[in-house]
Image (spheres, rainbow, N blue to C red):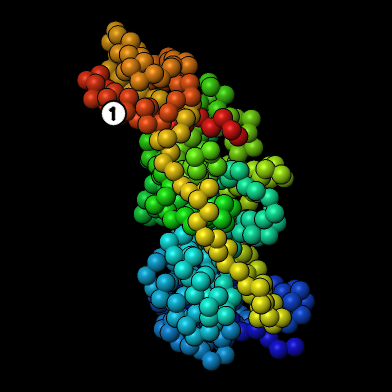
Amino acid sequence: MREVKVGIIGLGNVGLGTLRILAENAAQIELKLGFRLSVRVVCSRNPAAKQLPDAFRDVPRTSDWKQVVTHPEVDIVAELVGGTTVASEIVQAAIANGKSVVTANKELMALAGAEIWDRAIAAGINLAMEASVAGGIPIHAVLREGISGDRIVALYGILNGTCNYIMTEIERCGADFAEVLAEAQRLGYAEADPSADIDGADARSKLAILAALAFGERITPDDIYTEGIRRISPVDFQYAERLGHTIRLICAARQSKQGLVLSVRPSLIPRGTILASVQGAYNAVWVRGRYGEDTFYYGKGAGPEPTGVAVVSDLMRVAREIRRGSPERVSPFAHERLGEYRPIPVETQKSAFYLRFRVKDRPGIIATLGRILADRGISIDAVLQLPSDSKDDLPFVITLERSREAAVREALEQMRTLDFMVEDPLAMPMETAL
Ligand SMILES: NC(=O)c1ccc[n+]([C@@H]2O[C@H](COP(=O)([O-])OP(=O)(O)OC[C@H]3O[C@@H](n4cnc5c(N)ncnc54)[C@H](OP(=O)(O)O)[C@@H]3O)[C@@H](O)[C@H]2O)c1
């Protein structure tokens, strides 16, 4: 049977992981497909320096991606470069040249996925992007096929392995954020510039894609309220534990009466919930449907091989479609805005909140904070103070009953100007729906 031919652009973590699997698992892939997947050309900025598996030692290498997207023999281009500049040119050029595309690029697909899919369909080529969210968890297939007959009510995810590693390490050993981040960088769990991970942008791109798939809505990263994890400290885990909770960077997309509420932010979640047991660099997605109710997906969110599996599986799916023809090619972003799911600001919603303060201790602090809250109709649920030696930097926590976020933010704005504050108060929602 005729083979399907692949060109791979990007020989970094994911590119090399993909090639390793294609080499080591070639026989089984061929048996499953009934034909061979053959790598015709590979490309990176400096391809000569790459150590490729023996099976691909003689495959032509180039540093010019244009040679791959115009290669007369290549059927599928794998874009494994990342970012939104060169990667976007590669994807557009591949489509224009009639090549099918497999991409692992969350940033690009979150920003321009709908347009790219429209172009791919118009050009009659196939596109696949499973590796772009949650690496080794086949969540695109779940949302597009497995549970597409359900009506999704909410989706909660732990979608950034770096953040989850850092949070669970702070929880486990009580070390400060900076110390744990440095260790994560040493172990390769965090990049030299970790900002895209720890400030939430990476998770936000992933949630934009998943929410678009789950709710049939056109969603861009700007629709998502985002906060990172830089301010989380060991003391927050101590207080969270007292409250029967832990803290995770939660990506949430849920339907409310008014519209779709989207956020990426550190949140308190009950210790008994399955999401609280997600440790280290693992990812998880929890989907709640009106009919099928709760389903949960768990696995490695990144890494050359888990992500490589997603890329290879996409190559196999696209190769099958090329061989058998797929007249029913449909964009997962195909839906027009339905209106019912339009994103709305998180400030309009009500939630229970955890407020953590660091103050210079003196009489009357609780009364002052209580007045600011009461002025806005916000009720205190509990006040917690663990023993502390320091009168100059005393941490304590106030939890709030369900309150409108806009009012809580107003109160925080006023509180941060008070002269006894050592730093701005930290506010996190307490997720009760999990
Ligand atoms: N790493 C993960 O675990 C993971 C998980 C899920 C999704 N992803 C996504 O997968 C994609 C790749 O990530 P990665 O971690 O593999 O990145 P990476 O290790 O930085 O690799 C990027 C590759 O792209 C090549 N490249 C950069 N600019 C190029 C250009 N102008 N022409 C040709 N090649 C170029 C680089 O070449 P040189 O090596 O020669 O410099 C490198 O081989 C990204 O979209 C990322 O978001 C990654």
Vertical comparison of 361 with 60: above or below: above
Residue located 28% across and 28% down the image: 413
Q: Which amino acid, mark 1?
A: Glu
Residue located 57% across and 72% down the image: 127
Q: Is mark 1 on a helix, strand or loop?
A: helix
Out of 315 and 58, give the one closest to the viewer.
315
Count the marks: 1
Residue located 50% across and 56% down the image: 337
Residue located 41% across and 65% down the image: 83
Vertical comparison of 60 with 432: above or below: below
> Based on the displayed image, in which of its 4 quarters is residue 315 positioned?
bottom right
Residue located beneath label 1 in the image: 413
Give the side of residue 201 with respect to residue 282, left or right: left
Residue 301 in sight: no
Q: Position of residue 364 (x, y in %)?
A: 30, 9
Residue 266 in sight: yes
